């Protein structure tokens, strides 16, 4: 499937980032759409919330991405904008496992189109720990991949009065930490989740970019609007033993947001029967 007949082919894409996310997104869009990637200088996305907690994020990640996109479109007079928003915390379905949850949003202001993807990955170093000794500090840094991945130091007083970022070397980290430990007796060390300081996150954003590009190339069979995507999934996959419907997914329904056309895709996970161990009739 070529991308050359796409409405996105060879257009100017503005990436609303100041954390070098273009390093992950740019190559995918250059390859597939021969995109001209534009990265605005001085676009400060920190006003929409920071990971290290100085500025609280308000609204859902998708809403935040929308606000970033709109602000960038207006400030730089761009009609095709990619905005992204990442969240970190427990995996939404695999409890207690940390996950990187990335939203990537394309807005085409010229054609009044919005296409979004979500990539949830357990590939993340997201962590934080209170430490009191040099050894604890060192072991945290080893697990989190420092110095390729950066870390953030915070004092443990109310409101974290001191937050130190962009530490480049182990020597620098150690001397800074020792200074804080001498004053406070302990400190908080956290992984830096900003894309440019976190190669693992950068690779998850690249996966999301791949997903977004493919969805942009998925067109409604009726009106040809890009972004033809799964709108809902329906349960009812039959059990292989009793043949009754189970809670497992039977089909995905693709829905066009523009014209409402929909199409069923049965057995999206390439499975026509469910194992009786997941059947509520055979194994209640
Ligand atoms: Zn349509
Ligand atoms: Zn059954």
Image (spheres, rainbow, N blue to C red):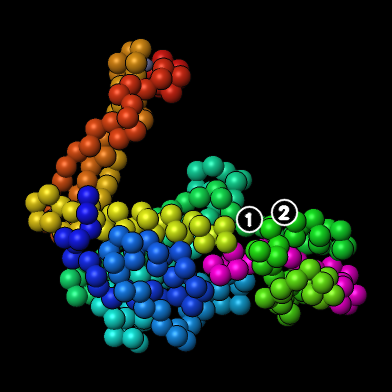
Is 140 drawn above or below residue 187 in the view shown? above
Which residues are drawn in magenta?
177-198
Residue 138, position as x, y percentages in the image = 81, 60
Q: In what element is the residue under mark 1?
A: loop
Q: Nearer the viewer, residue 222 or 92?
A: 222
Q: Is residue 59 visible?
A: no
Is 33 drawn above or below residue 168 in the view shown? above
Residue behind mark 1 = 125
Residue 95, position as x, y percentages in the image = 57, 43
Q: Is mark 2 in CB contact (under 8 Å) with mark 1?
A: yes
Q: Is residue 123 left or right of residue 175?
A: left
Question: Crowding near pointer 2: few (<14 within 10 Å), some, many (20+)?
Answer: few
Splitting the image into 4 quarters, where does residue 266 fall?
Answer: top left
Residue ID at (25%, 78%)? 79
Splitting the image into 4 quarters, where does residue 172 fall?
Answer: bottom right
Residue ID at (33%, 58%)? 212
Residue ID at (34%, 33%)? 269
Q: In what element is the residue under mark 2?
A: helix
Q: Nearer the viewer, residue 220 or 238?
A: 220
- Residue 189 highlighted magenta (yes or no): yes
Q: Nearer the viewer, residue 9 or 216?
A: 9
Residue 239, position as x, y percentages in the image = 34, 19
- What whole-number distance in Å separates the C-alpha atoms at marks 2 and 1? 8 Å
Residue behind mark 2 = 143
Residue 163, position as x, y percentages in the image = 70, 77
């Amino acid at each position: 499937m070529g991308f050359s007949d796409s409405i996105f082919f060879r257009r100017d894409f503005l990436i609303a980032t100041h954390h070098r996310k273009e390093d992950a997104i740019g190559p995918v869009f250059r390859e597939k759409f021969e995109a001209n990637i534009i990265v605005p200088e001085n676009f400060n996305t920190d006003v929409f919330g920071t990971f290290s907690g100085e500025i609280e994020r308000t609204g859902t990640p998708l809403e935040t991405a929308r606000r970033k996109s709109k602000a960038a479109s207006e400030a730089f007079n761009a009609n095709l904008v990619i905005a992204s928003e990442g969240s970190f915390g427990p995996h939404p379905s695999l409890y207690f496992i940390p996950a990187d949850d990335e939203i990537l949003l394309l807005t085409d202001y010229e054609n009044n189109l919005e296409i979004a993807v979500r990539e949830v990955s357990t590939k993340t170093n997201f962590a934080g720990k209170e430490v009191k000794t040099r050894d604890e500090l060192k072991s945290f840094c080893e697990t989190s991949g420092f110095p390729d991945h950066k870390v953030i130091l915070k004092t443990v007083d109310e409101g974290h009065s001191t937050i130190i970022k962009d530490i480049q070397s182990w020597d620098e980290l150690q001397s800074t930490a020792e200074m804080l430990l001498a004053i406070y007796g302990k400190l908080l060390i956290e992984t830096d989740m900003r894309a440019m300081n976190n190669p693992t996150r950068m690779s998850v954003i690249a996966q999301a970019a791949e997903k977004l590009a493919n969805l942009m190339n998925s067109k409604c069979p009726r009106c040809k609007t890009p972004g033809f995507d799964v709108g809902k999934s329906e349960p009812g996959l039959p059990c292989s033993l009793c043949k009754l419907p189970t809670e497992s997914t039977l089909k995905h329904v693709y829905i066009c947001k523009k014209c409402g056309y929909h199409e069923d895709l049965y057995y999206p996970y390439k499975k026509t029967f469910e194992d009786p161990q997941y059947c509520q009739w055979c194994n209640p």
